[in-house]
Image (cartoon, helix red, strand yellow):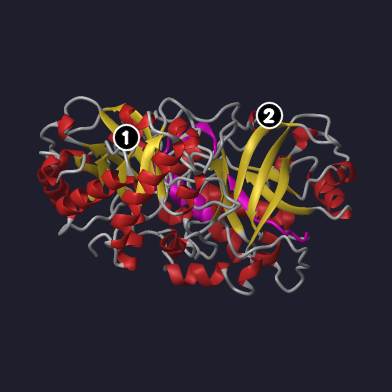
Amino acid sequence: MKIYKTLLSLLITCGVISSGVMMSASAADSGIYNDITYSSESKEDEEFKVPDQISKVGNSSASEAIAQDENVSASAAMLETPYNVFDIYDAHQKYVKLHSGDMSMIYKKAEGIDVSYAQGKIDWKAVKDSGIDFAIIRAGFGNANKYPNQVDTWFKYNIEEAQKVGMDVGIYWYSYALDVEAAYNEAESCYNVIKDYDIQYPVFFDIEEEKQKRLPTSQVSAIIDAFCSRIESKGLYAGVYSFSSLLSSNVYQQVLDKYTVWVAHWDVAAPGYAHDYGMWQYNARGRVNGINTEVDLDHCYINYPYLISPETYVPDGTETDSSEQLFPVSMDKGKAKGIDVSVWQGKIDWDKVKSSGVDYAVIRAGYGDLATQTDKYFEANVEGAEKAGIDCGVYWYSYASSPADAVLEAEACYEVIKGHKFEYPVYYAVEDPSIAALSNQEITDIINAFCSTLEKKGYYVGVKSYANFLNTRIDPSVYSKYDVWVAHYGVSKPAFNSHFNMWQFTNEGKIDGIKGYVNCNYAYLDFPSIMKKAHINGF
């Protein structure tokens, strides 16, 4: 069944073309653009507080709870109406831009830093010799055209000395903009500072100020679009930088799809940002030879030097056309948010479940080796979920003691689920204490018997159990054939040693429409697309 997963390989893209935003040239500058902004810039000491995993599933977008600043103009408030302000390029145009040229050159892992005046005088040769591939250099902040002292005092030294030793460079501009006019002026300021330099990485708009976080989503999106579209109108490659929480909750995805994304999230296995990104700032307290202070550390996954200047790019053999082994899997939100239910949840109000933000449900079809052991709420749950617009998968709970028993369980499962269409896999839940008494080989044979039987009938099949059981009781060969749904609670990432595409992260979720606790999950593949394109699971 792994073959079907390659259908998603073209979905990872990084939007880069945009159109301009019209804006007035006469609005007065805000009072924040003065000398005190120089000392007020600060990369946050820690990631913004994000709602816990249960509330992410059960609540509507966090952006709805962000208070509007009392000074936001009426025109900004109008942007909260149906989103039709920005030019949204279709997927083909974005794809053509990213994949122009040689596909085998698109992705490349590189290690970098980002620096400003705060790092003082840097020995760039020592930095280069330490293994750093690129540097994103602060050019300045605010409206430096009006306040020239807001050009970073070490910018000229940093970019010239870095390039002397062969370091690839990009730019970031720290923003204080609270409206599109201010963002436009910041873009003009940035361009005037950097226009005489060759730049191999994007020009990033750094948006993270407290006042900006309190703006409505429409205003933040308009500010980002104003800066980035103006930078790209100058022939440069624009991107946006911020913390994962702001990018996830307070920017329209249509805007983020237009530009490359550099996400900041520290001390985690993967950034808590569920969409495409090209760079990840993973550490704010790094130490690098040649720099006497702590410095931000970054992973890059997109081959920006090639995309920006393909005609002058010299390959080094580390480029690839696949992102699969480069990007860490996001452990926070995934592609979709889901629940799994059985008779234990009783009667469910599926419309309320849908309204709470749940995308899919994995429903217990039954257990054991008899079709009469159907979960008594199975049909009602499938019907209710489908009517509410919730995608469905199923699981069958095993008590098998031999491969022959597992085949009977697979046949029983088939009798219950045939005639239905499922956007998510059919999972074999192997977690009963009775199974734990068997040998590893017996357990492996049981799983293979169940899964192969249903796979032959046209189903996308996976195995579900707890992380420790998956690690220690099942032969890893199973994971190369069938998908994995891992259960591990109270952790930032499940402690499973192989690949998985669904994570049951809590058994104490609270969801509108369900009385009591419910299991909550994240899915990391676009399963509905896989099923429909491959014509499996009843499609």
Tell me what residue is drawn at x 17 percent, y 30 percent. Answer: 344
Which disc number belongs to residue 68? none
In 3D space, how far apart are the residues under numbered discs 2 and 1 (Cα atoms)? Answer: 44 Å
Q: Foreground residue, 1 or 268?
A: 1
Does 216 appear in magenta? yes
Give, as a single range, the part of the protein colored magenta.
Answer: 197-226
Q: In the figure, is residue 247 to the left or right of 41? A: left
Q: Is residue 212 visible?
A: no
User: Which amino acid type is shown beneath numbered disc 1?
Assistant: Cys
Q: Foreground residue, 420 or 409?
A: 409
Report which residue position mark 2 lands on: 39
**Image x and y of residue 38, in percent:** 68, 33
Q: Foreground residue, 30 or 10?
A: 10
Q: Is residue 102 above or below residue 354?
A: below
Q: Is residue 481 above or below residue 367?
A: below
Q: Is residue 394 above or below residue 436?
A: below
- State which quarter of the image contains the N terminus: bottom left
